[in-house]
Amino acid sequence: MAAFGSVFMPEMAISWFDDERWSEAEVVPGNSLQLHPGAHVLHYSSTCFEGLKAFRQGDGSVKIFRMDRNINRIAQSSELLALPKIDKAQVAQMITSIVARFADQVPEAPGSMYIRPTHVGTEPAVGKAAVPSISSCFYVLLSPVGDYFAGGDHALRLLVDDKNMRCPPHMGMVKSGGNYAGALLPTMKARAEYKADQVLFCPGGDVQETGAANFLLIDGDEIITKALDTSFLHGVTRDSILTLARDLGMKVSERTLTVDELLERAAKPGCEAALSGTAAVLTSVGTLIHNGQEYKVGNGGIGETTLKLRRALNDVQWGRSEDKYGWLTSV
Ligand SMILES: *Cc1c(COP(=O)(O)O)cnc(C)c1O
């Protein structure tokens, strides 16, 4: 099985902004992006992206999960990066039409079609380190993905880093390239030194998130997770899981969680922790590593409540339960 996100559909949807308006969206070969080597994005990281999925329903139709949320988020990312303002209606049209074009390639459950809208600053101007790009390109890639848990569902090991930030505080809600590049070295070090899968960034002891997923602590029937602020990425999966958890009668506490409280609570039997994101949905965290010491979360394995919440979300995505919040868009 190819690595997640390494197989692409042969075509993509694309539109260019030329300082005044967006060009009419086109469908072009998926490997045909031409940029000037001096393009703003290649020097000053004027780039943002989204990750969402389309799911094949039981009746064979294809639906996209929470597309409006992802479009709003890339509109916000673009604004916070001083990229040209996107045309949300055009982007929605680009996403639904490219998915419809490749509808027969959307894998059956438990697979799905991963959708990667991307917005980059294209102006060839290496002198614009402190000035925005006046032109840009918006494209939508598709990548069919299999069952994320096909290799077995392992509980993750997280290095709890209470010193470093994942990114500057004002960049937390921007889904932008530089933030990921900046988190690579700390994550590679955590792998080499502690066999950790990810780093849980907790600057000043404030539990935020990992390099590309939100963090949830599940203590009995209560979920504790950081309240939304500008310092971290507002996950659509996070929001969906919290909504479904409330529906299941769980208590949702969006508030500050300190490393001290996390380590204290995690040790209790029955406690669970999980990472949420579009790719991995909801993945159990079994071990926390802090100051060279290992702490098991609950029994250190896959959490039952985590599985229950993941299933509840998957059931909506694949149309096995009622879409009562209107999260699915037909293509
Ligand atoms: C994409 C992402 C998430 C998860 O967001 P979803 O909308 O749930 O996929 C969380 N944190 C970071 C840093 C991310 O890039």
Image (cartoon, rainbow, N blue to C red):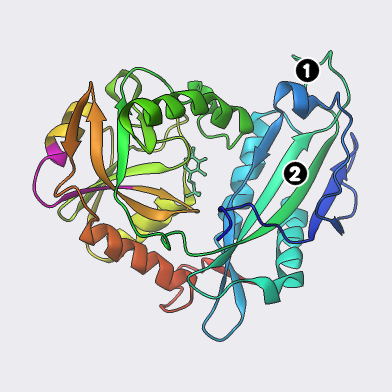
Image x and y of residue 253, in percent: 25, 45
Whether 173 is among the magenta residues is: no
Closer to us: 184 or 222: 184
Residue at 72% x, 21% y: name it: 44
At a point 86% along the width and 44% down the height, the residue shown is 16
| Outermost bottom residue | 59
Q: Say whether residue 30 is left or right of residue 238.
A: right
What residue do we see at 54% from left, 79% from top? 57
Magenta range is 265-274
- Please name the residue that numbered disc 2 is placed on: 86
Tally the numbered discs: 2
Residue 220 or residue 230, whichever sits in front: 220
135 vs 259, nearest the viewer: 259
Q: Mark 2 vs mark 1: which is more N-terminal? A: 2
One can see residue 116 in this view: yes
Q: Please name the residue that numbered disc 1 is placed on.
A: 131
Q: Is residue 265 above or below residue 291?
A: below
Q: Locate residue 143, reporting x and y percent.
A: 65, 58
Q: Residue at x 57, y 28 (%)?
A: 181
SS for callout 1: loop
